[in-house]
Image (cartoon, helix red, strand yellow):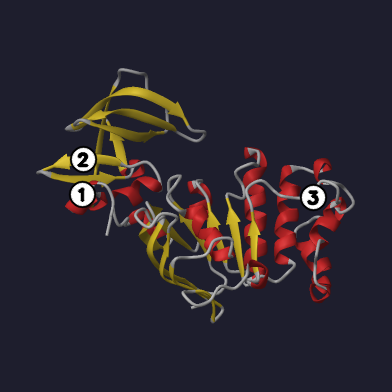
């Protein structure tokens, strides 16, 4: 494995660890998305990888070298890890080329032309950060990181400050660059579209505990617990025979008549379809419709038992062990 994290524990107060016995591994060139609510330990973990925080126990092994354990702590500048922050930290008094080249070792200068071309920055190299768009600033930050041939690239909410009309374009461009160069990448994001579209695997965190680590398809269709199911999109809850089942809205079909129905409380236009919200058997449900339905109208629906997801009693909240 290219990146291995073994029994990693991080705390500021021993009685309240931020990360608890984290174990996972990453293959060379994979893009791994970390997903979890605010305060779950995602950004703290990135800082541990980068060397901005020391771990309390466990080990981090990158490219067959130990960079942090009980006996070893490799300084951040020696780790060959690129870190792209959320707020595009470019020097305002330097132009884009000078920002990319800042403190660049001579051995990496041969990469400049290639990386500038890959990131599409040729026309803005002599401009200053305030003279270029948010997308160009983001690509400049990416270029500054990857020109140094990092063993690992860390992206902390890299697309959150971009306007919606260019976000997907920039995201897809950066994805192509990372894959073309086969750069192993850890991405922290709250955007489920980012997670599902560019991740090779997803790691879901809650309260410093790994909940599930798998491919986007497996995570979405076969979540480990209800927390994971809810993190990756809308899901409906159905209580039946003293058991709780879950089903995705897209697996529920609106029909003309059925034993299952609810009264529409809200109807949202989502671009290509409409989202209907109502109360079914004491739970808030969402359905997908290709046309608007008036408020207070009854809608009937059906679903296949094979599409139901069931979790045992451990799923009342989330895994805590």
Which quadrant does the C terminus fall into?
bottom left
Above or below: residue 152 compared with residue 279: below
Q: Secondary structure at mark 1?
A: helix
Mark 1: give few (<14), some (14-19) or many (20+) Cα within 10 Å.
few
Residue that numbered label 3 is attached to: 91
Mark 2 residue element: strand
Q: Which residue is mark 1?
A: 305
| Crowding near the residue tagged with mark 2, few <14, some 14–19, many ≥20 C-alpha atoms within 10 Å | many
Horizontal placement of 20 versus 236: left or right?
Answer: right
Alpha-carbon span between mark 1 and mark 3: 57 Å
Q: Residue at x 37, y 19 (%)?
A: 294
Q: Could you tell me how far apart the alpha carbons at marks 1 and 2 are, in whole angstroms?
A: 11 Å
- Residue 257 seen in this snapshot: no
Position in image of residue 10 (x %, y %): 44, 61
Residue at coordinates 30% horizontally, 57% vertically from top-left?
A: 224
Give whichever of 116, 63 is nearer the camera.
Answer: 63
The label shown at residue 238 is 2
């Amino acid at each position: 494995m290219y990146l291995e994290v073994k029994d990693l524990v991080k705390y500021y107060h021993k009685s309240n660890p931020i990360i608890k016995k984290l174990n996972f591994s990453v293959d060379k060139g994979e893009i791994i998305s970390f997903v979890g609510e605010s305060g779950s330990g995602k950004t703290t973990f990135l800082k541990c990888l980068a060397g901005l925080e020391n771990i309390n126990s466990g080990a981090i092994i990158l490219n067959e070298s130990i960079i942090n354990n009980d006996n070893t702590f490799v300084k951040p500048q020696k780790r060959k890890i690129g870190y792209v922050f959320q707020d595009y930290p470019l020097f305002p008094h330097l132009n884009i080329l000078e920002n990319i080249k800042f403190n660049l070792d001579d051995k990496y200068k041969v990469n400049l032309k290639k990386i500038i071309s890959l990131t599409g920055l040729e026309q803005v190299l002599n401009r200053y950060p305030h003279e270029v768009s948010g997308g160009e600033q983001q690509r400049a930050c990416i270029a500054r990181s990857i020109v140094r041939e990092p063993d690992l690239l860390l992206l902390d909410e890299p697309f959150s400050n971009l306007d919606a009309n260019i976000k997907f374009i920039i995201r897809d461009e950066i994805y192509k660059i990372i894959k073309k160069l086969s750069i192993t990448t850890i991405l922290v994001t709250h955007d489920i579209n980012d997670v599902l579209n560019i991740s090779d695997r997803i790691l879901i965190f809650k309260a410093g505990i790994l909940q599930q680590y798998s491919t986007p398809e497996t995570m979405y269709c076969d979540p480990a617990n209800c927390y994971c199911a809810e993190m990756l999109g809308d899901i409906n809850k159905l209580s039946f025979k003293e058991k709780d089942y879950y089903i995705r809205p897209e697996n529920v079909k609106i029909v003309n008549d059925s034993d299952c129905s609810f009264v529409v409380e809200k109807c949202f236009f989502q671009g290509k379809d409409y989202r209907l919200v109502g109360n079914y058997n004491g739970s808030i449900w969402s359905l997908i419709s290709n046309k608007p339905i008036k408020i207070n109208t009854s809608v009937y629906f059906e679903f296949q038992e094979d599409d139901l997801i069931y979790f045992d009693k451990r799923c009342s909240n989330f895994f805590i062990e």
